[in-house]
Image: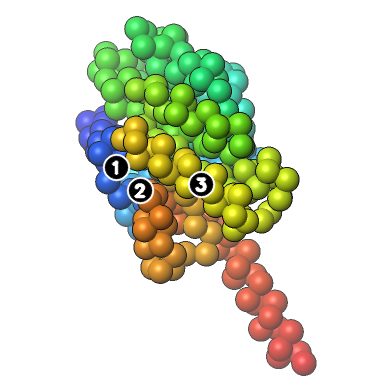
Amino acid sequence: MSYEERLARRRALKAKLVNREPVFGGWVSYTDPAITETFAKAGFDFIAIDMEHTTISLDEAKRIITSAQSEGACCLPRPVSHSNDILKPLLEAGADGMFIQMVETPDQVRTLIDNLKFPPVGRRSYGVNRAHGYGFDFDRYITEWNDSSPLILQIESIRAVENIDALLAFPEVDGVMVGPYDISGSLGVPGQTNHPKVREAGRVVIEAARRSGKSCCTQIADVSVERVKDAFDQGFTFVILGSDLFILWKWAENMRSVMAEVRG
């Protein structure tokens, strides 16, 4: 895919997020690029890479980014930390934007913007790698990156919920993603994602995103049309439709039940 095509898709995704239009993503936790290519052929707006809860390396992430983009999908990694030692290589590898896990304070957001955006918006350093077309697209990339790259913050603690308006106040933030599992843990009810306290925290984030005109995301592990429609009815504007890990896990569970029944 040419630089112009990648830029057009990145801008299209950014515009949908800014306008709170429906956006659909897929999530990959396994390293094989064939999985990413298969997902991308489904027509997702983006493919997210889970580097937080997997062993996916920077080199493996680069292959996943390339595979997603080769099939026409944007690729947004979720790094394992906020460290620029992780963020910078992913940016240089050509990531279209970022999901950032466990963001809680405005100071963290400011530091993330410094690391992710070029001056004068941020302090990202200049170099040449795949993102810049190995030099061929350098001038266009460094002038067009700031305005075309999505930044999504994951809201995963009650502290983040309490700070949500301040987190959303940054114009560089395009949206937030509610993390009900971690929120449940921070509220003392780990794993109880339907607990009233957890649902109320989610509602607070959804309403704050609506007030600020930012997109709001959730992940649906067991996907159906009804569950997707319910998420949009709740006020979410974009969703991640499961993951390769969840798909294989559920398939394996079903196969275990089949074998057990046949074996008697």
Residue 137 visible in image:
no
> Mark 1, residues whose alpha carbon is within 10 Å: few (<14), some, or many (≥20)?
many
Q: Amino acid at mark 1?
A: Arg
| Image vertical order of residue 192 relative to residue 254, above or below | above
Q: Which residue is mark 2?
A: 237
Q: Which residue is mark 3?
A: 202
| Image vertical order of residue 15 relative to residue 173, above or below | below
Mark 1 touches mark 2? (CB < 8 Å): yes
- Residue in view at x 32 percent, y 20 percent: 146
Q: Which residue is mark 1?
A: 20
- Residue in view at x 29 percent, y 27 percent: 148
Whole-percent x, y for residue 77 in the image: 49, 36
> Which circle, 3 or 2, is nearer the viewer?
3
Q: Amino acid at mark 3?
A: Gly
Whole-percent x, y for residue 159 in the image: 61, 31
Instruction: Give the CA separation, mark 1 to mark 2.
Output: 6 Å
Q: Amino acid at mark 2?
A: Thr
Determine which of the numbered discs, if any, sits on residue 85 in the image.
Answer: none
